[in-house]
Image (cartoon, rainbow, N blue to C red):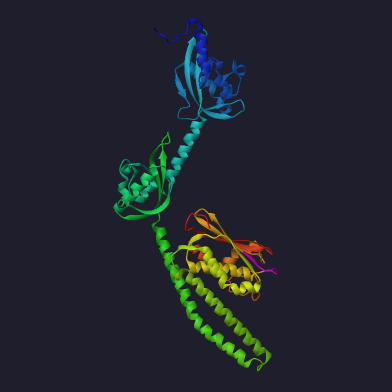
Amino acid sequence: MNDRFMPTAGHRESFFRALVEAAITAIVAVDAAGRIVEVNRKTEELFGHGRDALLGRSVEMLVPERYRAAHPGFVAGFMAAPSARPMGVGRELFALRRDGEEFPVEIGLSPFETGEGLFTLASIIDITDRRRADEARALLAAIVTSSPDAILSKSLDGTITSWNAAATQLFGFAADEVIGRSIHLILPPEQREEEADLLGRVGAGEYIPPFVTRRMHRDGGLIDVSMSLAPLRDHRGVVTGASSIVRDITVAKQRDAELRRSNAELEQFAYVASHDLQEPLRMVANYVELLARRYEGQLDERADKYIHYASDGARRMQRLVADLLSYSRVGSQSKPLVPLDSRAVVEDVIRSLGRAIRASGATVDVGALPMVLGDEVQLGQLFQNLVGNALKFRAEAPPVIRIAAVPQGGLWQFSVADNGIGMDMRFADRIFQMFQRLNERGKYDGSGIGLTIAKRIVERHGGLIWVDAELGRGTTFRFTLPAATREPPR
């Protein structure tokens, strides 16, 4: 028994009408004069015109104004030699919506003849999304092609599948020499195990952020590179390969090494200079003090004043040299960063500043502080500078100093806040510069190097330091330090 549905002659017209109405493409039937004689529901949706507004009208109402002059000639040519043909494939073709918006289309034209004459059936597809996707792919391809970084892709077994011009410049292989071959072409033997591990991680869907490694040039030379990897997925979301962005950092590493060597030489110079200056300065200061004690009142008032100036200058120079020596030691005499209890460091600092705290009537409130990676001596110096500043730049009210820390990713953000004289935030950048003072000399002790040392200590620990303040309302110094663990503070 044959159960297939076969429309009867009486139902065939309605059946085909239903087929046309259900089509997912717009269908427009046009007579030899270019008038619309029939449309389906998708045509109404696509162009925004109702069926009644379309039937009997020239098909040119669906054609943008800039193309209408040429359209009658095209229709006449088609009718003279009718044949099925596509339009808009591989070139720009646009249609016009009721609201005046133009949109890209592809059209399939098919002639058909009835007892009433020759007609054309136009099947119209909106290709806006496809065009956008094509443009996005073209833009991406242009970016990859013109990128100064080597961009390549490979399958999960390490077979190279794409290779841009920068990769050719970096590694010396042309694209047609490497595509389809193993990534081992550019891998030093000692990096092959690393590559296998990376492809395994990418195959599991992991993105590998930039890291420093080595790759090999065609001539066998080694290249220092920074490289990142990202998984490539197919239409089902399955990881099929990896894309790599590779940057040559050979010159950058050389400059970095030169900069480190130069900085080390400058630190050594500053250390030697400040260290060797201490003894002659001590001698000058001592003899000036002897002059002041022995001859005070025996010479005229002007001589006493000159001796006072000389003694004060010698003392200030001693402090300055001592601070320069401390600054140079941040780099030259630093120790490895190890896990340590920051609260213990702060408590030691508070004990060492006990006399100044009691003399000023200050209150120091220490919150829960974490384990961090740090140099204990340098962190002690950092907190001593910041707490000492809070005691020095106090207002009339007794100082209130609060020390706290909050987690920030793999870091801890510390704060040292006070209720002192504050500052104008317009000058916030100046306070971390060497010898910069916002207050008149003589009103507050110091060389203007303390916060410069604090900044250098924080940066040596891989952190940042900044200030929030309001004139007359207090100052809060904030800085970040690396966490020793990811556990919350006690």
| Residue 191 visible here | yes
- Identify the residue at the far right of this view: 396
Q: Is residue 397 magenta?
A: yes
As displayed, is residue 231 above or below residue 314?
A: above
Nearest to the observer: residue 378 or residue 187: 378
Q: Is residue 367 magenta?
A: no
Q: Position of residue 435 (x, y in %)?
A: 58, 71
Nearest to the observer: residue 457 or residue 432: 457
Residue plotted at (43% across, 44% down): 144
As displayed, is residue 439 above or below residue 201?
A: below
Residue plotted at (53% across, 77% down): 321
Task: Determine which quarter of the picture holds residue 479.
Answer: bottom right
Nearest to the observer: residue 416 or residue 85: 416
| Residue 436 visible here | no
Q: Position of residue 152 (x, y in %)?
A: 38, 44
- Identify the residue at the far front of this view: 490
Q: Position of residue 342 (x, y in %)?
A: 52, 63
Residue plotted at (49% across, 69% down): 377
Query: Magenta span covers which residues?
Result: 395-401
Q: Position of residue 276 (x, y in %)?
A: 47, 80
As displayed, is residue 315 above or below residue 207?
A: below
Where does the N terminus fall, quadrant-wise? top left
Nearest to the observer: residue 255 or residue 3: 3
Please indicate whether residue 235 sits to the left or right of residue 398 in the image: left
As displayed, is residue 272 above or below residue 154?
A: below
Residue plotted at (59% across, 90% down): 291
